[in-house]
Structure formats: C-alpha cells, structure tokens
Image (cartoon, rainbow, N blue to C red):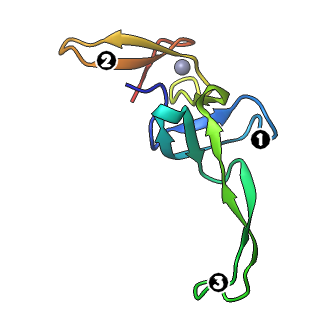
Amino acid sequence: MARIKKGDTVTVLSGKDRGKSGKVLQVWPDRDRALVEHLNLVKHFERRSQQNPQGGVIEREGAIALSKLAPMCPNCRKPSRVGWSVSGDGQKQRLCRRCQGVLS
Ligand SMILES: [Zn+2]
C-alpha cells in the first residue's frame, strides 16, 4: 500500500511549491510520482488543434516526486510522516507519526 493515495490532501516539502498543498489527482507508485491539483504547474506549448484553435502556452500540473510530498493529517492539520499499523482484520493502516491518528 502506498504512503500517498489518490484523493489525499498533501503538502509539498521542497521545491518551488514548498509549503503549498493540494489534492492528489493521480499516483504512479512505480515511478514514485504523483499529480497534485494546481501544483508544480509546467508550461506546455500546444500546437494548434480543433479543441485549441489558437495553440500556444497552457499550464498544466506536472508530476511531483512522492518523496517531496507529505499527506496532511486530518487530526493535527499538519503534514505528517506516515507510519503503519495493522488493524484487527489484518488491514494495513496509515498512521500520523505526530499524533498517532489514523489517516484514511
Ligand atoms: Zn496527526
């Protein structure tokens, strides 16, 4: 199971978007990268097309390394380091190491 999941709210720990947070749109665990809403915007130069007759520059989210992201803990409302625990039914759960609360 991944440290960061789609739908999490995460905070960026380093890089130009440090301190910002957003919702995870997509995760590629095999590439250790994630796409986060409105973060790490990169400019794409689009060719003219039917959808975009002007062509030109658009900004889109770029993939961010998972190691630069920390999930926001809903209990202590801070970026948390993720620990693990196994619940009664054998499911692995993510824990906030700061407050020991369970991250969904
Ligand atoms: Zn916490």
Of marks 2 and 1, which one's residue comes earlier in the chain? 1
Which quadrant would the C terminus be assigned to in this image? top left
Between the C-alphas of marks 2 and 3, the distance is: 45 Å
User: Quadrant location of the N terminus?
Assistant: top left
The image quarter in which residue 81 lies: top right
Q: Earlier in the sequence, mark 1 or mark 3?
A: 1
| Dot 3 crowding, Cα within 10 Å, few <14, some 14–19, many 20+ | few
Dot 1, crowdedness within 10 Å: few (<14), some or many (≥20)? some
Mark 2 to mark 1 CA distance (whole Å): 30 Å
Residue 10 against residue 54 in the figure, above or below? above
Is label 2 within 8 A of ligand 1 (CB to nearest ligand atom)?
Answer: no
Residue occupying the far left of the picture: 89
Mark 3 residue element: loop
Kind of residue at disc 2: Lys
Q: Amino acid at mark 3?
A: Asn
Q: Give the CA separation, mark 1 to mark 3.
A: 28 Å
Q: Residue at x 43, y 27 (%)?
A: 2
Mark number, residue 17: 1
Measured as percent of width and height from the top left, residue 43 is found at: 76, 61
Image height check: is 92 above or below 29?
A: above
Residue lying farthest right? 16
Rendered location of residue 63, percent (x, y): 62, 45
Which residue is at a point 47% across and 33% down the rendered structure image? Answer: 29
In the image, residue 31 sits, relative to residue 43, either above or below, namely above
Say if 30 sits above or below 80 in the image. below
Quarter of image, res 47: bottom right
Which is more toward the observer, 24 or 56? 56
Residue that numbered label 3 is attached to: 52
Q: How packed is label 2: few (under 14 Cα within 10 Å), some, or many (20 or more)?
A: few
Which residue is drawn at the image coordinates 46% and 44% (left, top)? 7
x, y percent for residue 6:
45, 42
| Residue designated by label 2 | 92
